[in-house]
Amino acid sequence: MNRSAALPIVLICLGSVWFLKSTSLLPNTATLLSLLLAAAGVLLFVVDGFNKSTLVTSPLLIYAGGAIYLYDAVGLRPSHLLSFGMILTGLLMLLARSEHVPERSRRFRLPSRDGEQ
């Protein structure tokens, strides 16, 4: 009989978060979300490398983390953060169109339903 380890893992994760929160070792939710988004952007760039996809998504994840932190800690208005985010997105999308930026590698693409790779 093969049992799933999902329940013990969920209990360990929830207990750890509860312990860190009750001992005030865990930062507030906005700071934690900011750090996680920025770390996801850096990790995506490290794992997938420099290509057309990561040129846009990685900096935007990092910016989203920074924008959440600036909104929560500094109190910048959402309209300022969103408008700058739109400008940044447009610039990154234009840069990604360059022929000097390589295409995304095939190793991370999901196979299509036809079975083509």
Image (cartoon, helix red, strand yellow):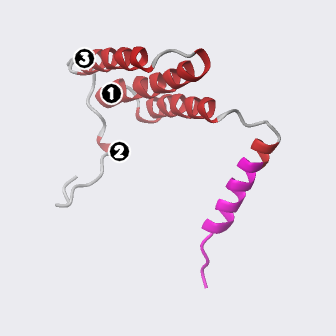
**Which of the two discs, 3 and 1, labels the residue nearer the N terminus?**
1
* Disc marking residue 108: 2
Q: Amino acid at mark 3?
A: His
Label pair 2/3, CB-CB below 8 angstroms: no
* Disc 1 element: loop
Measured from the top left, where is residue 36 in percent x and y? 56, 34
State the residue position of label 1.
51
Residue count near mark 1 (Cα–Cα under 10 Å), binned few <14, some 14–19, many ≥20: some
**Which of the two discs, 2 and 1, labels the residue nearer the N terminus?**
1
Say if the magenta span includes residue 4.
Answer: yes
Q: For marks 3 and 1, give the CA distance.
A: 10 Å
Residue count near mark 3 (Cα–Cα under 10 Å), binned few <14, some 14–19, many ≥20: few
Label pair 3/1, CB-CB below 8 angstroms: no
Q: Is residue 105 rendered to the left or right of residue 28?
A: left
Q: Amino acid at mark 1?
A: Asn
State the residue position of label 3.
100
Q: For marks 2 and 1, give the CA distance.
A: 12 Å
Q: Is residue 113 rendered to the left or right of residue 41?
A: left
Measured from the top left, where is residue 72 in percent x and y? 58, 23
Q: Amino acid at mark 2?
A: Phe
Image: magenta residue range: 1-18
Which is more toward the observer, 82 or 114? 82
Measured from the top left, where is residue 14 in percent x and y? 69, 55
